[in-house]
Image (cartoon, rainbow, N blue to C red):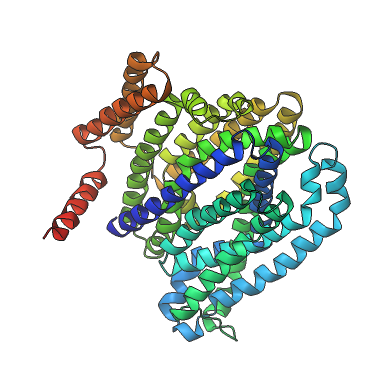
Amino acid sequence: MGQIRKQVIQSSFLAYIGFGVGAINTYLFTRQGIFTPEQFGLTQVIISLSQILAPLASLGMTAFINRFFPYYFDRLPNKKNDMLTIAILFSSIGAILVFSGCLLFEPLVIKKFQSRSALLVEFYYWALVFSFFYLCFTILESYMGALKKTVLPNFMKETAYRICVFALIILYMFQIIPFSIFVILFCCIYLLIVAIIISYLFFTRQLHVSTSFSSVSRRLKKSATTYVGYVYGGSVIINMARQVDTLALAGAQNLATTGIYSLNQYAAAILQVPFRGVQAIAGPLIAQHWKNKNLTEIKRIYQRSSINLLLIGSFLFINIWLNYDDGLKFLHIDSQFATGKIVFLLLGLYNLFELGTGANAVLIVTSPAWRFEFYAGVILLALSIPLNILMAKYVGIEGVAFATAGTLFVYNICRLVFIKRRFNLTPFTIKTLYALLLVTGSYLLTWFLWQHIHGLGGILLRSAMFSILFFAGIFYFQLTPDLPQFIAVVKKRLNRKKP
């Protein structure tokens, strides 16, 4: 677990720096007098569109890299390793097919969104540019994950990207560029990120593009094709199900409502930062353990990831929820955005549950039972799309949040039950119960004592008291060995720096 812990700490630290910058960006997007809710909504719809188009165009190459990298890196020298060549070839074919289809169906997009979300129609082509370069990044991110070089892509995705957005916001805020140029440059940020990662791989001599197919590729052709077909279908379905809420609101309501939903969705997504880091780092390790049939080590990673993610997520969620109203007022956020409070609650509770399930997603897709992810995804999509569309049309943002959280909750329950029955593995231990009791008790005591104190003073008092109770409980009940070990490492390094 040391390797995972080290890279998770590094990646999470950089990611939270990025989320700090992202929080500033979101504040500037939503503060009165800079952007309108429609303009903020446009940026979120562009991002949501990329989350659907990029996996669709990848033709499953990210799953291919994650699953089969041990066979390539264990058996081939660098110059003959054609894994990246295959990924580039097939994702290029996918990009041609998908983006040609987007151009072909442009009249349908105009008909659907013109009346309620005209800005999306205006910048439709640039949204496709954003999606294409995001596709390129996902391929490189998976490849660097296989090389166990996760810190750079995580930094570029979570931190550098948001720094670029911040720079563009400043340029727009001081009227150096108009909004049209802002959107164009926003859609080209991943071009810069891709160029930096390619340069890094080139100068470190890790950019291996073979001109011929290896014996490993020929031997794995049948099994890889079957695996990628199922996992690709499942990942596309899951991404569509996860993004349908934003697109449904843009089509059934308007970009302003989408912006309100997206702000609260973003606040709930803060919980997911360590989750993405664990997936990127634990995935290759779990794949290696499946290859070696080391179920004991898989169980250890699974349960350790569960308790660590649950604790981190609980700390973030409760601090935000305790200070939600006072935080918006203190930051002078446009009052329209406060109408989405229930969105944050519903999506935040679901994200907390998903964190508690640990690395179950990568455990399934790298296991011999990887087909399950496809079939479960089909059920998820069948529930999610009609439910979100109906809720967006007749209920609004709260209904969409309920539909999204509810369907994903059912989906993750299915994952848990399957893993338990197939591999007799569960992410939960008695420490999970202790953690939930600790979080609940700390929250209730903090809320009871300081609920009537408002403003910055109330925010500081509630945050300080909950944090003290929470971390004291973690140490007392010894809920995770990683926190004491992390503190010990920090102390050791600080002592080394003393003269």
**Side of 321 relative to 87 (left or right):** left
Percent from the top left, x then y, of residue 240?
A: 67, 46
Side of 418 where 485 appears, left or right:
left
Image quadrant of residue 195?
bottom right
x and y percentages locating residue 179 in the rendered image: 71, 49
Spot the residue most to the left: 499
Number of marks: 0
Query: Measured along the vertical axis of the image, is residue 467 above or below residue 130?
Result: above
The residue shown at (41%, 58%) is 281
245 vs 299: above or below: above
Q: Tell me the quarter of the picture where residue 161 sits.
A: bottom right
Location of the C terminus (image quadrant): bottom left
* Residue 382 spot, x, y in % from top left: 69, 39
Name the image quarter holding the N terminus: bottom left
Quarter residue 288 falls in: bottom left
Instruction: Using the rendered image of the protein, determine whether residue 60 is visible from the camera's viewpoint.
Output: no
Q: Residue at x 17, y 51 (%)?
A: 491
Q: Which is more toward the observer, 388 or 13?
A: 13
Residue 74: percent from left, percent from top: 41, 76
Residue drawn at x 71%, y 66% as measured from the top left: 94
Q: Is residue 95 visible?
A: yes
In the image: residue 383, left or right of residue 137: right
